[in-house]
Amino acid sequence: MKLGDGHFGDVFLVYNEQFGVIAAKLIQNGKFNAREWEAASQVNRGEQNPFVVKSLLAQKQDEYVIVLQEYSNMGDMENFIQKMPVLPISTIRAIMKQILLGLRLLHEKGIVHRDIKEPNILLHSPPGSGRVIFKIGDLGIVKILKNVNKETLMTKIGTAIFMAPEVEIGDRIADGKV
């Protein structure tokens, strides 16, 4: 079953004997970003964070790279907001806390996401738990902070409407907090 598509490929719901029900991302070889897999590997090392989608395996085929990821069973934040346009402040705080804890893990591991937006925040409700976990997904245009300079941090990449104003203006006077 097709779950969605994006700039880099399509995502399907599949069953894998080792992992169970998961999401499989099919990316054309020419569009596969090895940085995404490196970032996912860094995220998966050490302390696990329930607020970042876990990548399980990447396998190169003839024309595609197949990336297996944990499945988030409640869609994305964009659909959630359309269904629930008004939320209590306490719910908004709980959602933001989860997203910020996910970002903290990425930043602690030297990863800058560069495309945080509603379709890249996935929702999962563990069966029988009665709760919803918001997870950061789509590490497609991440930047791994090894040899980062101000120029790199100010690169216009991602979705324009979600960029920091300093990046969009392009005056190059912002610091690494962008």
Image (cartoon, rainbow, N blue to C red):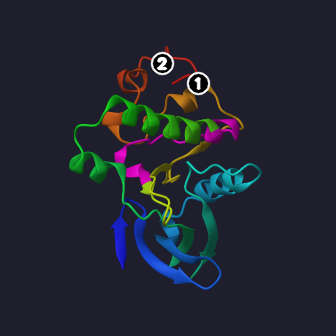
Query: Residue 109: x, y in percent?
Result: 70, 41
Q: Quadrant of the N terminus?
A: bottom left
What kind of element bears circle 1? Answer: helix
Mark 2: give few (<14), some (14-19) or many (20+) Cα within 10 Å.
some
Residue that numbered label 2 is attached to: 172
Side of 39 where 8 appears, left or right: left
Q: Is residue 127 covered in magenta? A: no
Residue 22 position (above or below residue 116): below
Q: Is residue 25 above or below residue 15?
A: above
Residue lying at 50% horizontally and 28% vertically, measured from the top left: 154
* Residue lying furthest right: 46
- Is residue 5 visible to the viewer in this orientation of the structure? yes
Q: Amino acid at mark 2?
A: Arg
CB under 8 Å between discs 2 and 1:
yes
Residue 150 is marked as 1
Q: Position of residue 84 (x, y in %)?
A: 24, 45
Segment tinted magenta in the rendering: 105-122
Residue 107 forms part of the magenta stretch: yes
Which of the two labelled residues, at mark 2 and mark 1, occupies the earlier sequence position? Answer: 1
**Dividing the picture into quarters, in which one does residue 156 lie?**
top left
Residue lying at 44% horizontally and 42% vertically, measured from the top left: 115
Judge from the rendering whether residue 78 lies leftward or rightward of residue 132; answer left or right: left
Taking the spot 55% from the left edge, 48% from the top edge, the residue there is 51
Q: Residue at x 58, y 22 (%)?
A: 176
Q: Secondary structure at mark 2?
A: loop
Q: Nearer the viewer, residue 73 or 118?
A: 73
Query: What amino acid type is highlighted by mark number 1?
Result: Lys
Say which of 86 and 6 sits in front: 86
Q: Is residue 98 above or below residue 68?
A: above
